[in-house]
Image (cartoon, rainbow, N blue to C red):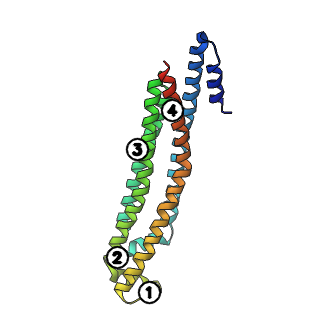
């Protein structure tokens, strides 16, 4: 049985004059658990940022950087990457501020409000990453597909066998990239659902328990 559930059970079985003490204990336990969850959200966000940062550094030192130059998309890739990091940093700052706010909350209502705010920010963070990742890739692909001569020249320079028919090449590329982007989207969605979804469920449970406790005050 969860420690918080034990507190709740003991509180319900206590005499009337001791109930206030138990409510304070339940509030403190819920506050500590909520603070820990938001701290984990913040730490996972940092680890995620570091992972993508290291990956991009490795790609910049690889042949991918030369490919970006040949296809004339290096500037947009660099800009989109920097912008993505900037927005993620803003979210991380928000996670940290939410963590500090929850840790310093003095009333049940304040804690409920901070938990709701944190859940909303985390959802926005997930939506942004999913939509932005797919959107940027679509924009880059549209730029590349807009100059099929350059693309075919790139394939010829690298001895890649493709159709000489531009229309056929375009259709095949659209099909392949649609599958790739769909796979990317669902991979990221599963990752965020597994990691952040589990933490948000725990946070939502704490919110419900606090709401019940607040009604009894």
Q: Residue at x 66, y 27 (%)?
A: 6
Mark 1 and mark 4: Cα distance apart in space: 58 Å
Q: In the rendering, which numbered label is found on residue 208? A: 4
Q: Which residue occupies the extreme top position in the image?
A: 17
Mark 1 and mark 3 in contact? Answer it, CB < 8 Å. Answer: no
Q: In the rendering, which numbered label is found on residue 145? A: 2
Residue behind mark 3: 90
Where disc 2 sits, the SS reads helix
Mark 1 and mark 3: Cα distance apart in space: 43 Å
Q: In the rendering, which numbered label is found on residue 162? A: 1
Q: Which residue occupies the extreme bottom position in the image?
A: 164
Mark 2 and mark 1: Cα distance apart in space: 14 Å
Q: Pick the residue in front: 98 or 109.
A: 109
Position of residue 103 relative to residue 184, above or below, is: above
Position of residue 117 relative to residue 149, above or below, is: above
Q: Callout 3: few (<14), some (14-19), or many (20+) C-alpha neighbours within 10 Å?
A: few
Q: Callout 4: few (<14), some (14-19), or many (20+) C-alpha neighbours within 10 Å?
A: few
């Amino acid at each position: 049985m969860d420690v918080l559930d034990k507190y709740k059970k003991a509180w319900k079985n206590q005499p009337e004059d001791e109930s206030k003490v138990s409510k304070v204990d339940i509030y403190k336990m819920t506050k500590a658990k909520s603070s820990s969850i938001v701290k984990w959200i913040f730490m996972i966000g940092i680890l995620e940022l570091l992972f993508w940062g290291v990956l991009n550094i490795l790609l910049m030192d690889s042949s991918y950087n030369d490919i970006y130059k040949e296809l004339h998309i290096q500037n947009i890739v660099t800009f989109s990457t920097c912008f993505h990091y900037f927005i993620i940093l803003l979210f991380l700052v928000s996670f940290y501020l939410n963590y500090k706010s929850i840790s310093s909350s003095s009333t049940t209502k304040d804690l409920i409000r901070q938990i709701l705010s944190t859940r909303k920010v985390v959802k926005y963070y997930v939506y942004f990453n999913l939509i932005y990742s797919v959107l940027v890739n679509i924009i880059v692909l549209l730029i590349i597909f807009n100059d099929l001569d350059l693309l075919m020249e790139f394939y010829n320079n690298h001895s890649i066998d493709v159709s000489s028919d531009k229309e056929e090449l375009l259709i095949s590329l659209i099909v392949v990239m649609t599958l790739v982007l769909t796979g990317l989207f669902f991979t990221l969605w599963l990752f965020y659902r597994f990691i952040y979804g589990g933490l948000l469920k725990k946070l939502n449970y704490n919110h419900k328990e606090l709401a019940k406790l607040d009604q009894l005050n």
